[in-house]
Image (tube, helix red, strand yellow):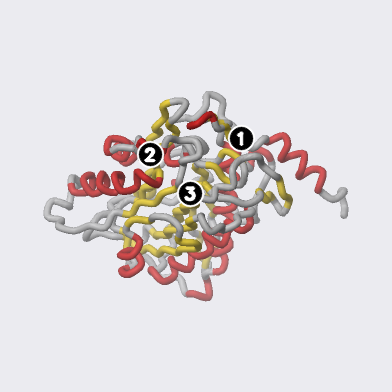
Amino acid sequence: MNPSATPRPRARDLGIVVGPTPTGPLNALTDVPGVRVGHATVRARPDVHSGVTAVVPDGVRPGAPVPAGVFVGNGYGKLVGSTQLAELGELETPVLLTSTLSAFRVADALVGWMLEQPGCERVLSLNPVVGECNDGHLSDIRSRPVREEHARAALDGASAGPVAEGCVGAGTGTVALGFKAGIGTSSRTPEVADRRFTVGALVQANFGGTLRVLGRTLDGSGPASETGSCMIVVATDAPLDARQLTRVARRAVFALARTGAAYSHGSGDYAVAFTTTRPGGAPPVADDGLSPLFEAVLDAVEEAVLNSLLAATTTTGHGGRTVPALPAGRLLTVLADAAPPDGH
């Protein structure tokens, strides 16, 4: 599953810190208790670079959903199951991410997997949630290489430990902001209404624009990703209702602007947000106490995008096309040259 033998640095390894709120111990979506992440990478060089990423809330199923919300920034994409999620404010399956033309096969695989889970013996209807990005610049997307066994591998292999980033799972063939991108994640532990909670974000980055890091821009040589998207999954243990989680999802999409996203005509920008705390499990958070959580989401998504870029490696794919990795040294030089002198 590891995209390279030598791991590349994350943003914080380079001293790039986004926002003042502390991270969780892994600085990942899995810092939220009860959330697991799994990947299945599908690669047949040079033509296939694709896969599946699964976000699995523990115990989620029809009859035992978790509160959730969804927000669409630009709707040129596919998010299977989004209408029921928005209507009922509930997530009753894991969230799977994959390649555009494989989204429907993955949704079918998720239905089959769910029907086999304990507590689903009598289920007659369920709402699979599957998002996608178009990895067709680097992968032979028309071959639809992602199959049922890959979706099941991502689900069965999901764990609560560190999350692999970059060219892995659903991010194997994605491109963002002129560089090779992929999966990225980050977390924060904000204090909300005198209680400490965890919020985490995971992105499948595949969108156009000009990379912006701490307010400084860095041009890349990759494609504009007009046919791309960004799928964002946000999880928290804060006791929020569906309406509040929709507000959280909205901030997740807003955060892409910080990284230089263009929100182009051909980009699908989506966020799903859920809480692992079911109704009645803890006193709810009032709306006027949500601002620290909103800020934490903005920071976590921004850092997750940076991590997706920094973890990715230069990739040559379908048609001989090559997309370079973000050069960490060049990025640090740009940031250093733009920094004001000490004391000013």
Q: Which residue is mark 2?
A: 142
* Disc with the residue nearer the chain's start (2 vs 3): 2
Residue type, numbered disc 2 = Arg
Q: Which residue is mark 3?
A: 202
Q: Which residue is found at the position 18% from the left and 45% from the top?
A: 116
Compare residues 23 and 69 and report the one nearer the observer: 69
Q: Amino acid at mark 3?
A: Leu
Distance (Cα) linking label 2 and label 3: 26 Å
On residue 325, which mark appears? 1
Q: Are marks 2 and 3 in contact (CB under 8 Å)?
A: no
Q: Residue at x 25, y 47 (%)?
A: 108
Within 10 Å of disc 1 (Cα), the crowding (few <14, some 14-19, many 20+) is many
Q: Secondary structure at mark 1?
A: loop
Q: Nearer the viewer, residue 75 or 257?
A: 75
Q: Answer with left or right where residue 23 lies relative to residue 217.
A: left
One can see residue 198 in this view: no
Element carrying mark 2 = helix
Q: Nearer the viewer, residue 340 or 148?
A: 148
For the N terminus, the quadrant is top left
Q: CA distance from mark 2 to mark 1?
A: 25 Å
